[in-house]
């Protein structure tokens, strides 16, 4: 079983460019979750054979692993991403979270940086290995370049970025009820402190 890297891509830019990015680079996995489609960013050559899914987790000594070598060298990941979530944060900001095995898809980020469809967009990327593995990264895609730095897993910028991308899903009627309770409490007379 691979270690999982939890990835975050925060996009900032004109709404039309964000929509073009979504149409070009976001697809749906087998669980119908949105994901950053690494194959849409850097298509794997069709002449390289990929074994059936049952054969992928463990490579046999006699197996042709050219597919694995290609993906690791170009995508930075053994498989395409999965288990994603697309969150609209504002008219010009979105967050895409997704998972990749063994580490972040750095090769795909480098390719995105060179893609002309990113010209008007800036992206903050972050990756964090699952709790039992070490490693966390924060990077940026801007001006045709991808840069990243290793950070501590408890780095406040990393934590804030993932919190921003994964807001709690509270139903609107509950939020409205909480707002009414808050306004009622703020209008209530203050009680005098009770002496101990």
Image: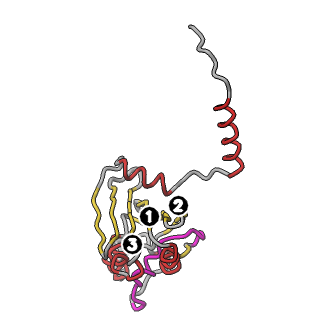
Image location of residue 158, percent across then percent down:
38, 53
Neighbor class of circle 3 (other Cα within 10 Å; few <14, some 14-19, many 20+) is many
Q: Secondary structure at mark 1?
A: strand
Image location of residue 77, percent across then percent down:
38, 71
Image location of residue 57, percent across then percent down:
43, 70
Left or right of 68, for residue 90: right
- Along the polypeptide, which appears first: circle 1 or circle 3? 1
Question: Residue 10 has which mark?
Answer: 1
Give the Cα separation between the discs numbered 1 and 2: 9 Å
Q: Is residue 33 magenta?
A: yes
Question: Residue 41, located in which quarter of the rendered image?
Answer: bottom left
Pair 1/2: label in front: 2
Which stretch appears magenta?
A: 30-47
Residue at coordinates 45% horizontally, 81% vertically from top-left? 40
Q: Residue at label 2? A: 89
Image location of residue 153, percent across then percent down:
35, 50
Neighbor class of circle 1 (other Cα within 10 Å; few <14, some 14-19, many 20+) is many
Image position of 45 with respect to 23: above or below: below
């Amino acid at each position: 079983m691979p270690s999982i890297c939890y990835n975050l891509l925060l996009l900032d830019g004109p709404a039309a460019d964000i929509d073009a990015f979504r149409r070009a680079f976001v697809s749906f996995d087998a669980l119908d979750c949105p994901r950053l489609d690494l194959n849409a960013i850097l298509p794997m050559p069709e002449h390289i054979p990929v074994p059936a899914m049952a054969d992928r987790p463990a490579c046999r000594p006699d197996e042709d692993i050219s597919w694995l070598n290609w993906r690791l060298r170009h995508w930075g990941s053994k498989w395409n991403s999965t288990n994603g979530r697309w969150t609209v944060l504002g008219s010009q900001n979105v967050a895409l979270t997704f998972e990749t095995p063994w580490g972040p898809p750095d090769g795909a980020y480098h390719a995105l940086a060179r893609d002309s469809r990113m010209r008007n967009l800036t992206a903050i990327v972050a990756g964090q290995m699952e709790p039992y593995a070490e490693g966390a990264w924060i990077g940026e895609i801007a001006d045709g370049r991808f840069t990243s730095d290793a950070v501590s897993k408890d780095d406040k910028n990393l934590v804030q970025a993932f919190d921003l991308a994964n807001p709690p899903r509270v139903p609107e009627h509950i939020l409205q009820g909480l707002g009414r309770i808050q306004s009622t409490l703020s209008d209530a007379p203050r009680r005098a402190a009770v002496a101990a």
